[in-house]
Amino acid sequence: MKHLAFFVCAALGCVPLTKSPEPDWAALGVYRTENARVGLPTSAEKRVVFFGDSITEAWVSKAPAFFEGHQYLARGIGGQTTAQMLVRFRQDVIALRPQAALILAGTNDIAENTGPYRQEDTLGHLQSMVELAMAHGIHVVLASILPARNYRWSPGREPAGKIIALNTLLRAYAEKNGLVYLDYHAAMADTDGGLKASLSEDGVHPNRAGYDLMGPLAEHALQKALAAK
C-alpha cells in the first residue's frame, strides 16, 4: 500500500520524482574553469592568491594595472562570508599552489549575509584558512577588515565597532603566530570609523583611489611574508 500511495501521489504531483539540484552555496563553480586554465605555477613563478569577497573581486576591474606584470590571482566572490570562503579555500587557494595568500574577509559576516554574526565563528573560519595555508607551505598575509559605518544592503548592523573588535583579534592572532598583518583599516578609516569618502562611493567598497592606496600596502606586506623563513 505504501508503494501504491507513493506512485499515486507522484502522479498527482505532490511528490517530485527527481530531487532538485542543491544550489552552489559556496560558489565552487565560479573559478573552476579558470583554475584549470592557469594550472600549476612554474618553479620560477612567485604566485600569490588574493582571496576574498567583492572587495577582492572588484579590484581586478577597478585597478587592473595592479595585477599586470605579477603572478597575482584574484579569487574574490561578491557577498561571500568566511564560512563560504572556507569551503572553497582548498580549490581556490591550496590547489593553485601559491607561494603566498592574502586573505581579506569578514565584512559580509558582520553584515549577516548568511546568518547571525558571531565574532568567534568568523575568527575561527579565518584561523582555519590560515592553518590550512600554513600546513601546505603557503605564506599568509592576514588583512584587516576595511572600515565601514553602514551596509546599504543590510541596514542597522552598526559595523564600525564590530570591525574594530574583530580586527583587534586578527592582529593578536597574527602576532602570536608569526603572520604578517596588513592593516588596511588604519590607512583607510575616517574619524568616525567609516571608510574615507575619498576612497569609496558607497562606504564599503573601494573606488580606484582606494585600490591605489591598498596596492602598495599589499605589496609591502607580501614582500615581508615571502621573505620569512
Image (tube, rainbow, N blue to C red):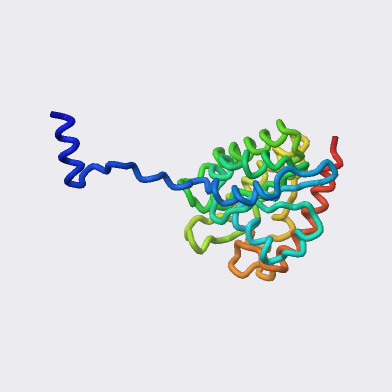
Residue 171 in which image quadrant: top right
- Which residue is at the far top? 1
* Residue 226 occupies quadrant: top right
Pick the residue in front: 16 or 139: 16
Does residue 136 sit above or below 119 in this rendering? above
| Relative image position of residue 97 (x, y in whole percent) | 73, 40
Tell me: 70 left or right of 78: right
Residue 64 picture quarter? bottom right
Residue positioned most to the left:
1
**Foreground pick, 34 / 89:** 34
Q: Nearer the viewer, residue 164 or 37?
A: 37
In this rendered view, identify the residue nearer to me: 139 or 197: 139
At a point 58% along the width and 50% down the height, the residue shown is 162
Residue 192 in sight in this render: no
Q: Name the residue rendered at 52%, 42% in the picture.
A: 118
Residue sitting at 78 percent across and 41 percent down?
99
Vertical position of residue 51 compared to residue 173: above or below: below
| Total marks placed | 0
Q: Is residue 146 visible?
A: yes
Position of the C terminus, as image quadrant, is top right
The N terminus lies in quadrant? top left
Q: Image check: 163 left or right of 213? A: left
Residue 92 is situated, as x and y percent measured from the top left of the image, at 64, 44
- Residue 14 percent location from the top left of the image: 20, 45
At horizontal 55% and vertical 51% (from top left) the residue drawn is 80
The spot of residue 25 in percent (x, y) is 48, 46
